[in-house]
Amino acid sequence: MLHKIKRLYNKYKSNPKKVRVVGDFFVVEPSVWPFLTAMGIFLLVLSTVAFFHYVTFGLFFLLSSFVILIGIASLWWKDLIAETSNPRIYTGLIQSNLKLGMILFIFSEVMFFSSFFWAFFHSSLSPSIFIGGVWPPDLFFEFGKVIDPWELPFLNTLYLLLSGVFVTWAHHSLPQDEEDAFFGLFFCLFCAVFFTGWQVYEYHFENLLLSDGIYGSCFFLLTGFHGIHVIGGTIFLTVCTIRLRYNGFSDGKFVGLDCAVWYWHFVDVVWIFLFIFVYVWGNYATPVYVLSNY
């Protein structure tokens, strides 16, 4: 079985030596990885819905589809990294276009989080009478559903800020000192793992639920999607750390690391806004009451 999988992989994997170069660009060969990745994402969404609806073995299918997706993505990334060994492919123009693509992707992520912040400010600045006309909603303090920002959230803020310092140190250490860059990335990942762990701990032990109206919905959508982006950034930086350890950047081209560092700074900035407005201002601001004629 494993032999057949390996033979199938060797058949469809990218071969950077056979790439066609046209001017300053290269023509990508047909690849099976985008199709398999799309199927993996489809299975992940399907199993997630099944898990939310308490379908039998829903958790098993969710974890299995996640492992399958990570495996497919890893094989695709392996081919992409192999392409960097061909000096004809990664010209200066290609590198600048890749960076521009990452900038546009981060901009789309900014718009993504802006929509959730819009929902949060719309609900908190003009709270509905159905939640008592006040933000946080009426009786949430009494029921212990308001999270203290100066405990775990503040600790997580310190972890993320420290990780930003370490990743900046690593970024500026290249290409002169790869050893310092490696340790900077290592300590950044250390902080990222602790941040994710404490976030899971907060979700598990706090009384706030996703079903707690607009307050719970805004909180979990913002912090949950941010947590997913933290996990994605952690995987991104982990790949860069492994490549750095095995001289994957010995050719002096750091496009992958540049994009990973930009993405991580974006994650840091989103959390700072989350901490200031959702945790601090949203929980300890002067209550906003709705004036009514009734």
Image (cartoon, rainbow, N blue to C red):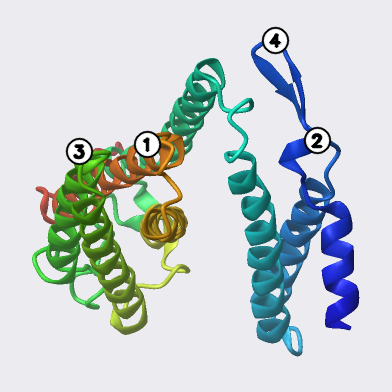
Residue 8: percent from the left, percent from the top? 89, 64
Locate the N terminus by quadrant: bottom right
Q: Earlier in the sequence, mark 4 or mark 2?
A: 2
Residue 198: percent from the left, percent from the top? 27, 74
- Which mark is on residue 18? 2
Please tell me which residue is depicted at 46% across the width and 40% down the height of the picture.
Answer: 256
254 over 82 or under it: above or below? above
Q: Residues within 10 Å of mark 3 (few under 14, many from 20)?
A: few
Image position of 110 (left or right of 94): left
Of badges 4 and 1, nearer the viewer stands 4
111 vs 193, nearest the viewer: 193
| Residue denoted by label 1 | 258
Q: CA distance from mark 4 to mark 2?
A: 16 Å
Residue 145 seen: yes
Q: Earlier in the sequence, mark 4 or mark 1?
A: 4
The quarter of the displayed image where residue 185 is located: bottom left
207 over 125 or under it: above or below? below
Image position of 91 (left or right of 184): right
Of badges 2 and 3, nearer the viewer stands 2
Q: CA distance from mark 1 to mark 2?
A: 27 Å
Of badges 1 and 2, nearer the viewer stands 2
92 vs 69, nearest the viewer: 92
Single out the residue that lies furthest toward the top. Answer: 23
Kind of residue sitting beneath label 2: Lys
Q: CA distance from mark 3 to mark 1?
A: 10 Å
Residue 101: percent from the left, percent from the top? 53, 26
Kind of residue sitting beneath label 4: Gly
Please tell me which residue is depicted at 11% across the width and 71% down the height of the picture.
Answer: 151
| Residue denoted by label 4 | 23
